[in-house]
Amino acid sequence: MRVWIDQDLCTGDGLCIDHCPDVFVQLEDGIAYVAQDGWPLNDPGGSNSLAAVDERAQQRVIDAALDCPGECIFIELEPPHREHPAIVSLRV
């Protein structure tokens, strides 16, 4: 799972930080950003503003997105990783 924030929609309420302070931060401008390894990703709208979410924090990130009054938190789900691709055999 990866997450990003559309800063144009952020209302600055900080509810996301209440839910998951290890993923969301609020900077001096009063707007929320996602953080990766403790560093805010400040590239609004850019590919560098996507943060990978640790499995332990995924439910808290979902809860933050659901509670966000600005509806500015966007979650991207990655397809499940398969160690071995499925093998399909067909009889003709």
Image: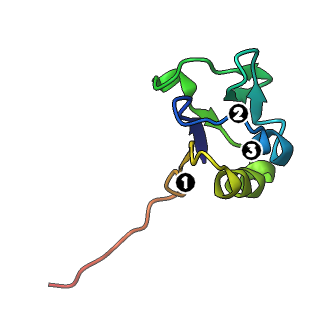
Question: Residue at horizontal 54%, vertical 58%?
Answer: 80
Mark 3 crowdedness (10 Å alpha carbons): few <14, some 14-19, many ≥20? few
Q: Which mark is residue 12?
A: 2
Gap in angstroms between the C-alphas marked 1 and 2: 35 Å
Instruction: Please say if 81 is above or below 5.
Output: below
| Image x and y of residue 59, in percent | 74, 58
Name the residue that disc number 3 marks. Answer: 54
Q: Is residue 60 above or below residue 40?
A: below
Tell me the kind of residue under disc 1.
His
Q: Nearer the viewer, residue 8 or 42?
A: 8
**Residue under label 1:** 81
Q: Residue at x 78, y 45 (%)?
A: 15
Left or right: 79 in relation to 91: right
Coordinates of residue 83 in the picture (x, y in percent):
56, 55
Distance of label 3 from label 2 (alpha carbons): 24 Å
Disc 3 is placed on an element classified as loop
Using the image as rendered, state which of residue 36 and residue 66 is in the foreground: 66
Are dots 3 and 1 in contact, CB under 8 Å?
A: no
Snapshot quadrant of residue 74: top right
Q: Secondary structure at mark 2?
A: loop
Residue 39, percent from left and from top:
75, 19
Q: Residue at x 75, y 19 (%)?
A: 27
> What residue is rendered at 74% in x and 44% in y?
54
Disc on the earlier residue, 3 or 2: 2
Residue type pointed to by label 2 = Gly
Extreme residue in the bottom direction: 91
Front residue of 19/41: it is: 19
Labels 3, 2: front one: 2
Q: Position of residue 1 (x, y in %)?
A: 60, 48
